[in-house]
Amino acid sequence: MLLSTKGDYGVRALIDLARYANEGPVQRSEIAKRRKIPESYLDHLLAQLRRGGYVKSVRGPGGGHSLAFDSNKMNLLEVLETLEGSLAPMGCVTDLSEDDGRAVCGQQWIWQEIYRFMCERLADTTIDDLVLHEQDHERENAARYSI
């Protein structure tokens, strides 16, 4: 599976919103700058995440974007499926109709195993897990550069 920029940038935006959740609504321009996401593309992603129920937005002074619910309840599988659609590596993994011959292909079983493992791992990983991992990585890098 190759994650598109839509999936990558969408997850980056959610990580940013989770990290700054205690500071109130976050401006789109702040997310774009910190996460290196083009603002026009970020608009599209935030709208998609809002429709998916992950983000809420407030207009006007003091407005911005925030998470619609706690980041420790947002699993990566559902987020990526909202942004990307199916993550299956081949159609025969999820579409098992007998009509087209794909359902009996010799490689189907391995792709189903890979897909099942990937889905389990993504479902067990939350946006909060990614935030904690990012913070740990930043602390490790800071420790390496301290004098």
Image (tube, helix red, strand yellow):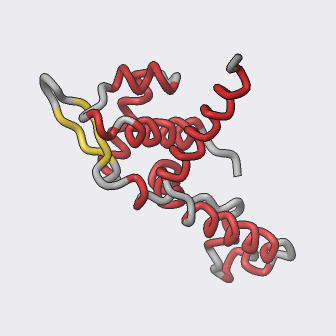
Q: Vertical placement of 129 versus 141: above or below?
A: below
Q: Say left or right for 112 vs 59.
A: right
Q: Residue at x 28, y 50 (%)?
A: 68
Total numbered badges shown on the rendered structure: 0
Identify the residue shown where x is 41% and y is 27%. 31
Placement of 53 over or under 39, stated as above or below = below
Q: State the image coordinates of residue 49 (x, y, percent, origin top left).
A: 37, 46
Of 145 and 52, nearer the camera is 145
Residue at the extreme right: 106
Considering the image in quadrants, where does the C terminus appear? top right
The foreground one among 102 and 34 is: 34
Rendered location of residue 80, percent (x, y): 52, 52
In the image: residue 18, left or right of residue 50: right
From this view, report whether residue 143 is shown above or below residue 135: above
Residue at image x 63%, y 80%?
97
Q: Quadrant of residue 95?
A: bottom right
Q: Residue at x 30, y 39 (%)?
A: 22
Q: Position of residue 134 (x, y in %)?
A: 58, 39
